Image (spheres, rainbow, N blue to C red):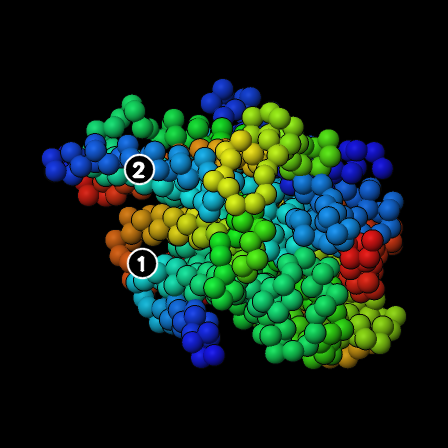
């Protein structure tokens, strides 16, 4: 393995951190230089993500990286006492997703903040958030998971409340920060319980020893509540519409990736840390019920919104339900391992990247729409398609993909979820399809209200080329994943689903057995 | 035996008081205090977890002493948690400052632009 | 009220803040030997800055302790920490390349009861200094910004 691939996992965390700390200093030298540096760091981060993906997919097994060098104790024991990064198929999948959203958000932000002040701290916090998300996805250590979780909380809330001149954004940021902190402390309490019982923090080590006693159950319950809260699962979603709705448009897109990183943590805990040590059928059904609740509440709340960003936010909440549904069915069947269980897992995981791309696209388009119309109220918009053809098209692509209409990516993953959940229990598929149909109705209403009709208002501010290009990249992803789902399921989703569903022993073995 | 468990009970009591404050208090500052209480409870829990009866401070150069050492890892965890808690509290309080500036009140019931 | 506190507070502050700074630097310096380290020492030094800010007011310190300077130093501290992580990348990120090399802080650590030798620990003491710099300036700038915000509140 060449040194660059070997160090790629740690570089993926270190480079955004370097960007976060260096941007304020470089910003002193001029806004232009800062912009070049920001773009460079974003591209380097993406390159590192690609490198991690190439390394893991060619290795086929989880790769580990020990910070500070691998340590062999004087007794000859090769025990994992140092901080370890462990990257398997699922981590790689999440890294690809995050890098895609982060790089588009960075380039979109260039012209988003052109006339506002304080861009330096914004760039710094954005990179810090990126580093935190990458850290959550790469770490092989429970405590570092908590640390990175808190880094994302602090950076994300700093960004949600970035527009200090708006009372609403401060309110949303306070609410989100309070709930994020509470969920972080629950995670810490669970880690403390596990440490007290097993004297270890390494995920692989804990997974090798975990049992099903009372302490394990309490820890699992705390982790489940905390991570579901941070992922915005109903009934712990109250922060999500506020945070998505009040954050600056590119940050709303990154927040989607942040929620999915928490969802990744949840999956990691359920599949890798606990695995078959607990009753998977019960837990699977808990997840399925939460999923149906999330779909139902998300869609019905979206129906009654008149604020465009809040509406998309509820749409994003409902999509979390589809991922939970697919993976929940996968978890419930992970003991018997029928074929459709794997398809459900693949559908749920595939939907994560599809959702990040199309909800991200919708949020970016909504940012342009709000700038152009000067209002967020759908009832006061209209006829924007006359002047903004590209934005209208991108918004349409995002909306149709979100509602699961072919040939866009949402259709591909939702079809996998419908098919497999139908085999498990038909009623699940029926509710999921109903949710999608309602969502289509909601977004057609939005499209009609904002873009169609006579030209009532002329755009105050048109999107720059860079903003259109960022949206174009996401739109291309949406279309490509929709047209060639087989290819992407085979190359990136398959290894991820396998790593969670079947890869527990390989994950443990990569650290413990050596 | 009971005395040994006392710190755990205090820690859980602190967490419970903190969650009570989060659920039933309406003043934003009191909510921040509630979060700090939960955090203190968790930190106390972690430190207690690492305590060994009559243990000495875990300093590398004292290693050859046959006395039992207090576990260093929970202390490192607690320290990290304190650092994070500091950043969190500072951030929450600055949001409170801005909210007060915009709405002129700290009562949660009176700040309700975001509903539904 | 012009942001200054009474003459008693200011006089005591002049006496005490130097001692606090010295103690803070002691904690940072001995971070690899005794309980303490970059964060704790940095927080102690930051309390000295906070004391200065509270006693003399933000206006009274203008030019000496402004958030422009503090934030620059904070970024320098953070970058120094990352660079210290990067210098070991020949083996692994955060690899302790200075330990036992004979450079500054590079002596081997003696085992057994001893008064503690400062010249040990490799990259760890350097990291303590980097973290200490970041924490002392970061916390001081937080206090400064919050205090300025609160003062504006009183005026309007």
Residue C134, position as x, y percentages in the image: 45, 35
Is residue A494 visible in this depiction of the protein?
yes
Which of A196/A246 is in front?
A196
Relative side of A237 to A429, left or right: left
Q: Chain of mark 2?
A: C
Q: Dot 2 corresponds to which residue?
A: C20
- Can see residue A109? no
**Residue A293 versus residue C80 in the image, above or below:** below
At mark 2, the secondary structure is helix
Residue A241: % across, % down: 51, 59
The structure residue drawn at horizontal position 58% and vertical position 51%, both measured from the top left corner, is: B64
C110 vs A318, nearest the viewer: C110
Q: Neighbour class for label 2 at 10 Å: few (<14), some, many (≥20)?
A: some
Residue name at image x 86 percent, y 46 percent? A59
Image coordinates for residue A496, horizontal then vertical, percent:
79, 56
Q: Residues within 10 Å of mark 1 (few under 14, many from 20)?
A: some
Name the subunit of mark 1: B
Same chain? Circles 1 and 2 = no
Instruction: Provide residue B28's location: percent of width, then percent of height.
Output: 33, 59
Q: Secondary structure at mark 1?
A: helix
Residue at horizontal 79%, vertical 33%?
Answer: A3
Q: Residue at x 21, y 33 (%)?
A: C15
In which quadrant of the rendered view does residue C88 lie?
top right
Query: If the image is split into quadrants, where does the N terminus of chain A sit?
Result: top right
- Which residue is disc 1 drawn over? B29
Left or right of residue B47: residue A274: right
Q: Is residue A500 above or below residue B87?
A: below
């Amino acid at each position: 393995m060449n040194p660059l691939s070997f160090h790629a996992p740690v570089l993926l965390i270190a480079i955004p951190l370097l960007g976060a700390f260096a941007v304020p200093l470089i910003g002193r030298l001029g806004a232009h230089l800062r912009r070049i540096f920001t773009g460079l760091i974003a591209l380097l981060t993406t390159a590192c993500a690609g490198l991690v993906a190439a390394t893991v997919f060619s290795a086929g097994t989880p790769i580990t990286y020990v910070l500070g060098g691998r340590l062999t104790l004087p007794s000859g024991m090769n025990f994992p006492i140092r901080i370890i990064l462990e990257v398997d198929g699922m981590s790689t999948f999440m890294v690809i997703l995050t890098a895609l959203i982060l790089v588009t958000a960075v380039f979109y932000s260039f012209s988003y903040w052109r006339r506002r002040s304080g861009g330096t701290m914004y760039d710094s916090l954005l990179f810090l958030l990126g580093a935190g998300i990458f850290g959550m996805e790469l770490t092989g250590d429970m405590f570092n998971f908590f640390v990175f979780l808190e880094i994302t909380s602090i950076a994300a809330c700093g960004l949600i409340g970035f527009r200090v001149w708006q009372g609403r954004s401060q309110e949303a940021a306070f609410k989100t920060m309070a709930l994020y902190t509470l969920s972080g402390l629950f995670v810490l309490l669970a880690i403390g319980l596990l440490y007290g019982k097993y004297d270890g923090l390494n995920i692989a080590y804990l997974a090798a020893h975990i049992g099903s006693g009372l302490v394990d159950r309490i820890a699992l319950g705390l982790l489940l509540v905390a991570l579901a809260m941070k992922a915005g699962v109903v009934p712990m979603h109250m922060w999500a519409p506020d945070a998505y709705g009040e954050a600056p448009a590119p940050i709303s897109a990154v927040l989607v990736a942040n929620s999915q990183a928490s969802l990744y943590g949840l999956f990691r805990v359920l599949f890798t840390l606990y695995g078959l040590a607990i009753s998977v059928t019960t837990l699977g059904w808990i997840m399925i019920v939460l999923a149906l609740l999330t779909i139902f509440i998300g869609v019905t709340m979206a129906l009654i919104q008149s604020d465009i960003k809040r509406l998309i936010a509820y749409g994003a909440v409902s999509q979390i339900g589809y991922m939970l549904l697919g993976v929940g069915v996968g978890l419930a069947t992970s003991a018997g391992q029928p074929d459709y269980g794997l398809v459900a897992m693949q559908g749920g995981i595939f939907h994560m990247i599809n959702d990040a791309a199309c909800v991200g696209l919708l949020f970016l388009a909504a940012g342009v729409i709000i700038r152009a119309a000067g209002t967020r109220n759908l009832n006061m918009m209209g006829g924007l398609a006359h002047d903004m053809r590209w934005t209208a098209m991108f918004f349409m692509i995002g909306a149709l993909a979100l509602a699961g209409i072919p040939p866009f990516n949402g259709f591909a993953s939702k079809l996998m979820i419908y098919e497999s959940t139908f085999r498990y229990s038909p009623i699940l598929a029926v509710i999921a399809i109903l949710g999608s149909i309602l969502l289509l109705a909601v977004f057609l209403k939005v499209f009609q209200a904002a873009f169609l009709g006579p030209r009532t208002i002329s755009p105050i501010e048109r999107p720059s080329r860079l903003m259109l290009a960022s949206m174009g990249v996401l739109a291309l992803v949406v279309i490509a994943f929709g047209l060639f789902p087989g290819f992407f399921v085979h190359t990136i989703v398959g290894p991820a689903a396998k790593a969670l569903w079947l890869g527990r022993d390989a994950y443990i073995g990569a650290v413990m057995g050596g | 035996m009971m005395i040994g468990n006392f710190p755990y009970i205090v820690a859980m009591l602190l967490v419970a008081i903190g969650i009570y404050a989060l659920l039933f208090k309406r003043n934003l500052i009191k909510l921040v205090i509630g979060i700090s209480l939960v955090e203190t409870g968790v930190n106390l829990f972690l430190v207690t977890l690492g305590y060994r009866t009559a243990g000495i401070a875990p300093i590398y150069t004292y290693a050859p002493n046959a006395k039992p050492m207090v576990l260093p890892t929970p202390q490192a965890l607690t320290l990290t948690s304190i650092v994070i808690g500091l950043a969190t509290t500072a951030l929450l309080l600055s949001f409170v400052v801005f909210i007060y500036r915009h709405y002129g009140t700290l009562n949660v019931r009176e700040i309700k632009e975001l509903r539904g | 009220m012009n942001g200054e506190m009474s003459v008693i507070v200011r006089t005591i502050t002049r006496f005490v803040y130097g001692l606090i700074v010295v103690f803070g630097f002691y904690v940072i310096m001995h971070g690899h030997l005794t309980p303490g380290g970059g964060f704790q020492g940095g927080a102690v030094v930051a309390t000295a800055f906070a004391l200065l800010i509270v006693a003399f007011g933000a206006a009274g310190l203008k030019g000496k302790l402004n958030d422009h300077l503090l934030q620059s130093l904070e970024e320098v501290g953070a970058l120094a920490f990352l660079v210290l992580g990067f210098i070991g990348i020949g083996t692994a990120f955060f690899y302790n390349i200075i330990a036992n090399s004979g450079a500054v802080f590079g002596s081997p650590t003696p085992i057994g009861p001893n008064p503690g030798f400062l010249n040990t620990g490799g990259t760890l003491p350097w990291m303590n200094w980097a973290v200490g710099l970041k924490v002392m300036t970061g916390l001081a700038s937080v206090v400064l910004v919050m205090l300025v915000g609160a003062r504006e509140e009183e005026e309007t």
